[in-house]
Image: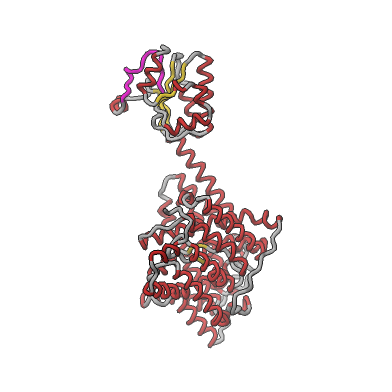
Amino acid sequence: MSSRLIPQIYDCFKEGYDSKRLVKDTVSGITVGIVALPLAIAFAIASGVKPEQGIFTAIIAGFIISLLSGSRVQIGGPTGAFIVVVYEIVVKFGYNGLAVATMLAGIMLVAMGAVKLGGVIKFIPYPMTVGFTSGIALIIGTTQIKDIFGLDSHPASASFVHRVQAYFESASTFNSYSIAIAAAALAIILIMPKFTKKIPGSIFAIIVTTAVVTIFKLPVDTIQTQFGDVPSSLPLPAFPTINLDIVTAVFPSAITIALLAAIESLLSAVVADGMTSTRHRSNMELVGQGVANFFSPMFGGIPATGAIARTATNIQNGATSPISGMVHAFTLLFILLFFGKWAKLIPMPTLAAVLIIVAYHMSEWRHFLKLLKSPPADILIMVVTFLLTVFIDLTVAIETGVVLSALLFMNRMAVATEVKNLGKEVNEEYEAHDVLSKDRIPEGVEIFEIFGSFFFGAVNQFKDTLRIVKKKPKVIILRMRTVPFVDATAVMALEEVLKKSDSEGIRLILSGVSPALMHTFEKAEFVEKIGRENICPHIDDALDQAAKFI
């Protein structure tokens, strides 16, 4: 079952893991490790932390995610989705605040998986996902302007407006060498796939531009000029400083990290399922992501999640099990230990070019434009989430998007729910498809039918419809054959109708009550109030019961 809390690596070994599969996983893991290197560095820098912290994340979190993953071929590590929220936390609370928020998010993810909320994430509306993803892409793109043009501006602000304003103010300080290096890197990344897909364009761009800048001593910012040397080893594990004040301050951001990690990792797992004809375990995936995010900050890491592009690359290179993701982590560790010291020479415009490509693919601009032709409610969700992500805060954007989506969904449900008087509002077409016709309704009996879910959003319509009866009947039959569920507000409304009916000498009878509704009524003690004999499974039974009171 997809809900089992058993890592996929267990099943892979149980099936039989031979040398042929090991070779495939090793080749794919090494390839993905090479692909992940520039992305890990670029995501870390864009997030406001040191470049090596991205590599630490890809090694530690990447290994744990593969070891405990609910997907066979998931590749974990830092992703572009986290850049905005991580940068804002670092600006406000420093790395210690980020570490605490990430560990809290890890605990939340484990809890979500443990209580089997993996399937709930799929109910996040698509327009909302496109809205904040496109917003993140725009922010990532604009944060690279400084390095692409070599601007001598103030440190990038967390505010989109202030950041753009700073760029305009420092526009005259552009560096033509930086522009040339960034353009060359972009050209290499875009052109390389036409010649070979075995060597990632980003790696080739880094090698070429780093060599050019180093050999010709071009006046271009590098990792070394901005961040100093890159260490050639993993740091020793250490807990961040944790107290109630910092936990309270970063808790909203931790929720955002947890939601983003859940959405991104499960979306990546779904994409992987489609490419491999397998089925991931969503709850185990959340647990794996949670454990990875809990331990990542102990080694100086940042938030991590399943990476769609790296997972797809893993599959395309023949991965068969989580071993490939673990090899990917060991590959990055090997690079850090033996080649980490050379990373300091990488030009900043080159990493900016890598992130521009990432932002372009994240933007989903075609989907954004397509959704502008959707119903107004979907457009509203997407646009509001997008604007809040760009101009306010990603945490606020996600919270608002979820609340707005829920409100609009409830409105749609309420509109879809109808209450009709079968003696007055039903036409001949309805009667042709039903056992009940108007001539079967005796004098002194009014029959109403509820179509759809009977919940708090539809209660007012229910009450309004009952008020249209001008002549007081002896019996009111409430037909509920198409009602899938009732909530506490609806039960309360029924109790009010029952009380009012009793005071006026009117008998209330329910018809078409399913076993599920009956169970709800019994728990709410409504059955005792209306009388079990007045709750009927079929309209014929209800009419027979009504005949006793006419």
Q: Residue extending furthest bottom? A: 215
Quadrant holding the C terminus: top left
* Above or below: residue 165 compared with residue 399: below
In the picture, measured across the screen, residue 316 lies left or right of residue 107, that is left
* Above or below: residue 336 compared with residue 135: below
Front residue (pair 519, 125)? 519
Q: Is residue 444 magenta?
A: yes
Q: Residue extending furthest top? A: 550
Quadrant of res 242: bottom right
- Taking the spot 35% from the left edge, 21% from the top edge, the residue there is 540
In the picture, measured across the screen, residue 538 lies left or right of residue 308, that is left
- Expressed as whole percent of the image width and height from the top left, the position of residue 27 reads 41, 75
- Expressed as whole percent of the image width and height from the top left, the position of residue 46 reads 57, 68
- Taking the spot 33% from the left edge, 25% from the top edge, the residue there is 427
- Expressed as whole percent of the image width and height from the top left, the position of residue 132 reads 51, 55
Image: magenta residue range: 435-448
Quadrant of res 546: top left
* Above or below: residue 404 compared with residue 294: above
- Taking the spot 49% from the left edge, 48% from the top edge, the residue there is 381
Residue 501 visible, this angle? yes
Quadrant of res 194: bottom left
Front residue (pair 1, 271)? 1
Front residue (pair 95, 194)? 95
Q: Is residue 35 magenta?
A: no
Residue 187 visible, this angle? no
